Amino acid sequence: MIPFLDLKAQYQSIKSEIDAAVLGVLASGQYVLGEEVIRLEQEFADYCNVKHAIAVNTGTSALHLSLLAAGVGPGDEVITVPFTFVATVSAICYTGATPVFVDVDPVTLTMDPAQLEAKITSRTKAIIPVHLYGQMADMDRIKAVADHYRIPIIEDACQAHGAEYKGARAGSIGTSGCFSFYPGKNLGACGEGGIAVTNSDEQAKTMRILRDWGQEQRYHHLLKGFNYRMDAIQGAILRVKLRHLEAWTEARRSHGRRYSSLLAGAPHLQTPVEAADRRHVYHVYAVRSRDRDGLQRVLTAEGIPSGLHYPIPVHLQKAHADLGYRVGDFPVSEAAAREVLSLPIYPEMPVQHVDQVAAALEYAYVS
Ligand SMILES: *Cc1c(COP(=O)(O)O)cnc(C)c1O
């Protein structure tokens, strides 16, 4: 039995550290925000090479607060991609702004910079590139357009902890960057969590106020805020896990490369492309195939789980039908949604399992 990912294996590998951190919080009596969360913010900001980090309850909340801090509201437009997890788009809708889509590049499946400029209008208030699967979007080209029109970039780095673009960490290039600590993410809490990072003192201050009911001082509400605070237990657990993140990332990268070398030359599928100027952190290892469903059936018959990230692009989701998009509007995203297949990958994954999955895929071709 090969699991798609194994969160229990990670817990077992650092059980004593996690248990001590949790018990410490239980004994402290400080259960929301507090010292552990403040320290996580400092350590995660250092990890991303940025000045500030604001810990929140989910990655979606980090996106929502980043948009609000950038001044986005009703009547505005925010540009993003349709080939992403729905949360990117939901966060835009929370502000009352309208999501505007740009198709993705067929090779990296991240925002196609060549199609960005045509989507900018006088109402565009932010651009959200998504660092899909753990590989950063083409930030130089996106930033050139954004800077020309003076539009802030908010990086959706929810799948890209520790990813790099020409040596710059995910989250450090845009006006702000947003990360999720959902358990299955590269850095995962034992529950929900998220964080926004920024070099802007002003944006950091606004996000900090907004996440805690719009107050800086108790019961003095400066802004209409939210309860987006992080639990202390999650802060303490994430601090422990952050110390292991680089080793886990290297294990993911090594599994990703092993898959790619074992599957190189398999004529029925394409392996993911690691751009030379980027550090891919393999949140997801997705191959592409015209016969994706056939491949998935073979894997399932062999007892190998796989995933679809994502089977329906956001512009074709029922929930967003009000935006008025149709089949054919974003052909690259639509083709990717039909063709991508995510294989099991997680840091503790035994190398033999990587080999078994690759062998099953090769067998699928022969049969
Ligand atoms: C996970 C994810 C989010 C949302 O994060 P949550 O912590 O689940 O709210 C947003 N964008 C992308 C690309 C994600 O993968």
Image (cartoon, rainbow, N blue to C red):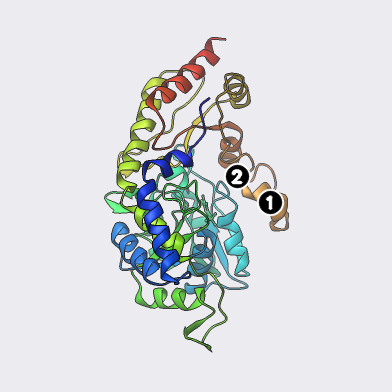
Of label 1 and label 2, which has the lower sequence position? 1
Q: Identify the image quadrant of residue 202.
A: bottom left
> With respect to residue 19, does 228 lie above or below?
below
Mark 2 neighbour class, 10 Å CA radius: few under 14, some 14 to 19, many 20 or more: many
Which residue reaches farthest bottom?
220
Residue at 48%, 73% (x, y): give it. 69
Residue 48 position (above or below residue 293): below
The residue lying furthest to the top in this view is 367
Q: Which disc, if any, is residue 293? A: none
Q: Which residue is drawn at 49% across and 32% down?
A: 344
Can residue 141 be seen at all in this image of the molecule?
no
Q: Mark 1 points at which residue?
A: 325
User: Looking at the figure, which quarter contains the C terminus?
Assistant: top right
User: Identity of the amino acid at label 1?
Assistant: Tyr
Above or below: residue 348 compared with residue 187? above
Question: Element under label 1?
Answer: loop
Cβ atoms at labels 1 and 2 below 8 Å apart: yes
Amino acid under label 2?
A: Phe
Residue 337 position in % (x across, y down) = 59, 38
For the residue pair 356 and 339, the one nearer the viewer reads as 356
Q: Nearer the viewer, residue 122 or 37?
A: 37
| Above/below status of 252 relative to 299 | below
Marking on residue 330: 2
Q: Where is residue 230 in the image (x, y as percent from the top left)?
A: 48, 66
